[in-house]
Image (cartoon, grey):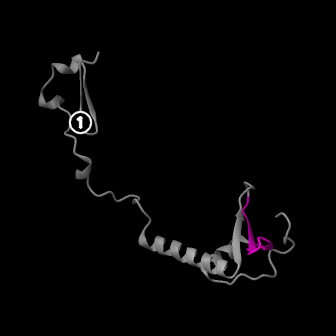
Amino acid sequence: MISDVRSTDRISIVTTPERAGRSTPADAPEPVRPADDVEQFDGVGSSPPPEVLAQIEAGFARLQELRDQGLELRYDTSDATRVKIDLVDADGQVVRRVPPTEAMEIVAGGVEPQRGAGVPGRVDQEA
């Protein structure tokens, strides 16, 4: 049976009759530090590192360049086993299917998208 419940900012202290009579320092709980008194956490931060943010920004800028050229990469993930990537024009027409490695190179700015040869035998077909 619980005889006493006290709350602090973040924890509740429950005293049962068995513990109510004990008050020796050996039985005393460790003091609880406020959350703002906790040491620096060296694990995963609350936001990506600056170099990752820079890469995201560069990728976004590259996609905007493609849009300015009337092109866009569209990713189809409806098949659980593969991703299909199409180079699409401003009218929404598929120009060609693009292999994933080439799509990454296009986004990274390493190659310009070609309006011609795509994945052999796969233009306007299911992969």
x%, y% of residue 91? 77, 73
Quadrant location of the C terminus in the rendered image:
bottom right
Residue 83 falls within the magenta-colored stretch: yes
Q: Is residue 111 above or below residue 81?
A: below
Please name the predominant secondary structure of the magenta segment in the image: strand
Indicate left or right for 97 with 48 as reference. right
For the residue pair 94 and 10, the one nearer the viewer reads as 94
Judging by the rendered image, the residue that carries numbered circle 1 is: 8
Residue 71, picture quadrant: bottom right
Residue 104, picture quadrant: bottom right
x%, y% of residue 55? 51, 74
Count the marks.
1
User: Which residue shows up at 25% across the image and 39% down it?
Assistant: 9
Q: Is residue 49 above or below residue 15?
A: below
Quadrant location of the N terminus in the rendered image:
top left
For the residue pair 26 and 99, the one nearer the viewer reads as 99
Q: Secondary structure at mark 1?
A: loop
Magenta segment boundaries in residue numbering: 82-98
x%, y% of residue 8? 23, 36
Residue 49 falls within the magenta-colored stretch: no
User: Which residue shows up at 41% across the image and 58% down it?
Assistant: 44
Residue most extreme to the front = 91
User: Which residue shows up at 17% across the image and 31% down it?
Assistant: 28
Q: Residues within 10 Å of mark 1 (few under 14, many from 20)?
A: few
For the residue pair 9 and 2, the one nearer the viewer reads as 9
Q: For the residue marked with disc 1, what is the amino acid?
A: Thr
